[in-house]
Amino acid sequence: MNLPSQPTTLVPDLPAFTFLRFSLLTLLCITTLAAFISSIVFSPHWHHDERLLLAFWCAGMILGVSFGRARGSHGVLSGALGGAVGCVLAAMFVINRFEQMPEAAARYRTVYLAFVVTVGSVAALAVAGCYQFIASGAVEILWLSKRVRGAVFVLFGGVVTVLVIRQLFREKPWQPTWEIAVKATDINDFPTLRLSANGEYLFGMQSNENINPPVRKAFVHQLTSRGMVGRSSPMERHPRNYILSPDGKWLVEHSLGDLIIHETLTGKVLQSWELGKISQLATQWQFNAAGDRLLLTTHTPRIQRLYVLNPLEAKLPQAELFPFAGRVLLDPTGEVLVKLFDAAEADGPRKVEVVRRSDGQLLGEMHDVPDLGTEYYAISPGGKYLGNTHHVWKLGSDSSTDMAGVVLGFTDDDRAIVHTEPHRQEPPELLPDWLLPMPLLQHAYDLRSYFRQLSIVDLRTGKTLTKTEPFKGMSIGMAAEQSHVVLGATWPESHVRIWKVPPRK
């Protein structure tokens, strides 16, 4: 009896692997790795040793996987071997820098080679294994299981829920309102920046004196709610010591005994005063709140002077005299005088009197305030607070309040703007010191770099109300005189961020 034959299913033979056979998955993996490595190679935040090492590691791993698959294997072990060989080749180019170390140079070479080979081979093994896992179709097979899909959904949903809850209860950092990317080759090429008193304009001057002829670029930006409106300025000089008028139209430069007013948009000299000896005695100059007068104070042993200059008049006016030994400073409005008296002994405590300029009425006193000479003082509108470096004095108080950084300015509602002290990202105690110069660890724990942030402190309670994220290399911090905006600049990132001071809640 002849039974009917069972139907047979023909399984086509898979094509044999050929070297450099076109594959969309292979192409996707190679382009993804190339894009990832390129972003690191051309990033200024990575050390040149790390960029070279990652480039050679990527090339060695790709060639190793291709060679292994051409021989009929999965290419996982050959990819790991190729990544290790690439790391060794890269190390040959940078290993000579250890010869400059005074001691233990041979040990550092051995540790360096062992570290890069171990990390490179393990990383290449993991990447090549993931590639083989995806290429073999294991992901599709696992996805067909209901248990696996359920576990993935539960895990993914849990992670998303945790992240959402964390963001809801996390203290939100103080976000910048405006940002500028600056093109600078070194720190000397970084632009000189100034904010106007009301924080509505920013002027910058960038010059490169190392080339002939020197290149100078000036710009003025208006800070608006919709963004920054930038214009170039044909300024030919590079003023180092200057201020900006509240409306951004005038730039006042103090240079070589003269006080010069430039038009920011045209670069023309609007007015110039020959100060002579007054220039050597000048301690402070600023615009008044209306922006139509320039206020200049001087310091002499017995009599202090205040000049009120009209930018449209060339004649130097008569000075207002204040007979006392010390220095006279102005609050941001120009309506309050801060008299810093000389101490009876060198480096002794000083007394400070706050006086209304219009009628000379004494508003209050401060005690035990050091004299910083020509260094920076931060004065609140109305003269209620006086800050220098890490201390704040209050009108009528006999003690100072310590701050966590340099005081940049004050708001008119009893808040201080502080540029915190630099701190470094310390490595864990488990890592020995001799392992820190290694690649990747050197990037994760760069002891040469520091982090800084800006914060707003409530002077009534001493609590920090808000603060920015810590930025790497934020060396410049300044606040507008009326403290409506704050500026922070980072190097070598060459980035300028400007924050608007939020209202008190």
Image (spheres, rainbow, N blue to C red):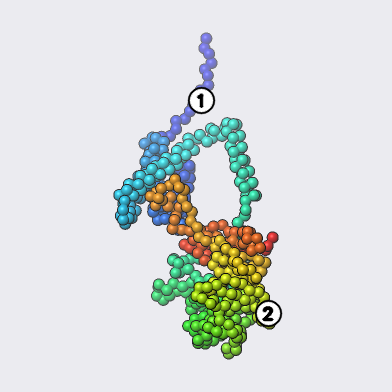
The residue lying toward the viewer, choosing from 272 and 137, is 272
Name the kind of residue labelled 2 in the image.
Answer: Gln
Is 383 or 84 nearer to us in this picture? 383
Instruction: Identify which residue is drawn at 52% across, 80% down.
Output: 254
Question: What residue is shown with label 2?
Answer: 361
Q: Is residue 104 left or right of residue 493?
A: left
Q: Secondary structure at mark 2?
A: loop
The answer to whether 94 appears left or right of 41 in the picture is left
Residue occupied by mark 1: 9
Residue positioned 54% across, 63% down in the render: 405
Compute the Cα span from label 2 to label 1. Answer: 105 Å
Question: Considering the image in quadrants, where does the C terminus appear?
Answer: bottom right
Along the line of sight, the residue nearer the viewer: 26 or 381 = 381
Q: How far across and how far down the image is residue 274, in percent?
A: 52, 87
Label 2 vs 1, first from the N-terminus: 1
Residue 81, visible in the rendered structure: yes
Amino acid on which the number 1 mark rests in the picture: Thr
Circle 2 residues within 10 Å: few <14, some 14–19, many ≥20: few
